[in-house]
Image (cartoon, rainbow, N blue to C red):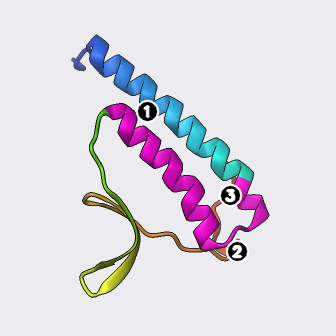
Amino acid sequence: MPKRLSMADLSREQLIQRYAQRLKGVLDEIVPQSPNESDFRYRVNRVLDDFCEELGFEIELRTEYGLAGKRADSVFNRFVVEYAASRPESRAAPL
């Protein structure tokens, strides 16, 4: 039998859904514009930063951060985000 979600779990799920939709909206808006990595990273990081803040996570966002001898595009504490442009032929078909 599946575990029942508590009210706290439900509100957390709603928060996740809200930010997933917000992130999708940002991506739908900026991807067709073919932004450079810096502009793309700025817009996406704002959503991720707001999401972490609303969850009550104390994060320290770093961009172009040296990590293990390489550069990570964005680091939210221990969560590393690496942005890379994809070639049009490698993009997945829309759902």
The residue beneath circle 2 is 89
Image quarter (top left, top right, bottom left or bottom right) of the N terminus:
top left
SS at mark 3 in the image? loop
Which of the marked residues, 1 or 2, is nearer the chain's N terminus?
1
Q: Amino acid at mark 1?
A: Ile
Percent across and percent down for residue 58 are 27, 44
Image height of 93 relative to 68, above or below: above
Q: Amino acid at mark 3?
A: Ala
SS at mark 1 in the image? helix
Q: Name the one closer to the observer, 38 or 34.
A: 38
- How far apart are labels 1 and 2 at the CA level? 30 Å
The crowding category of the residue bearing disc 1, from other C-alpha atoms within 10 Å (few below 14, some 14 to 19, many at least 20), is some
Q: Which stretch is magenta? A: 30-55
Image height of 76 relative to 6, above or below: below
Image height of 90 relative to 43, above or below: below
Percent across and percent down for residue 41 are 55, 63
- How far apart are labels 1 and 3 at the CA level? 24 Å
The residue beneath circle 3 is 93
Percent across and percent down for residue 31 are 70, 60
Q: Is residue 80 visible?
A: yes
33 sits left or right of 83 in the view: right
Residue 46's disc is: none
The crowding category of the residue bearing disc 3, from other C-alpha atoms within 10 Å (few below 14, some 14 to 19, many at least 20), is few
Q: Quadrant location of residue 62?
A: bottom left
> What residue is at 49 percent from the left and 30 percent from the top?
17
